[in-house]
Image (cartoon, grey):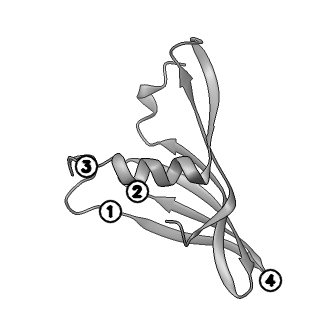
Amino acid sequence: MNEVMNDSLNKVTVGFSRTLRKEAVTAITKKRMLDNAANWNKSNMRFPPNPNNQVKILDVYHRIATVKLSSDNWIEYLHLIKLDGKWSIINLLWQHKNVKMYPF
């Protein structure tokens, strides 16, 4: 993950804040993503044994691109940039597929 995420990564999700009791946007940094990756699935039970991930390149223009990732659990839209010949993720917007978990 460290190699594919730009240091300026902005990961955002639209969801529901139970604390605020309203819709909310939550953002996390690259550092938090790396911390989450190191600890989040230690039980090895958070993902299906045979995940179904589909990647669709929506647009590429010179050194920028937009990609859609559909997984078993969520949809993500990624903005990528190409610096020094290497692509990295600069923005990531995602939402759970199970929209029933959002009480709005």
Could you tell me which quadrant the C terminus lies in? top right
Which disc is residue 15 wearing?
Answer: none
Could you say which quadrant of the image residue 71 lies in?
A: bottom left
Q: Amino acid at mark 1?
A: Asn
Q: Is residue 64 above or below residue 10?
A: below
Which disc is residue 42 wearing?
Answer: 3
Check disc 4 and report the residue beneath it: 62
Q: CA distance from mark 4 to mark 3?
A: 39 Å
Q: Amino acid at mark 3?
A: Lys
Q: CA distance from mark 1 to mark 2?
A: 6 Å
Q: CA distance from mark 4 to mark 2?
A: 27 Å
Whether residues under marks 4 and 1 lie with C-beta atoms below 8 angstroms apart, the answer is no
**Which of pointers 4 and 1 lies earlier in the amino acid sequence?**
1
**Which of pointers 3 and 1 lies earlier in the amino acid sequence?**
3
Whether residues under marks 1 and 2 lie with C-beta atoms below 8 angstroms apart, the answer is yes
The residue sitting at the bottom extreme is: 85
Q: Amino acid at mark 4?
A: His
Q: Amino acid at mark 2?
A: Ser
Q: Is residue 20 left or right of residue 71?
A: right
For disc 4, the neighbor class at 10 Å (few under 14, some 14 to 19, many from 20) is few
Q: Secondary structure at mark 4?
A: loop
Check disc 2 and report the residue beneath it: 71
Q: 22 or 99: which is nearer to us? A: 22
Which disc is residue 52 wearing?
Answer: 1
Q: Is residue 61 above or below residue 52?
A: below
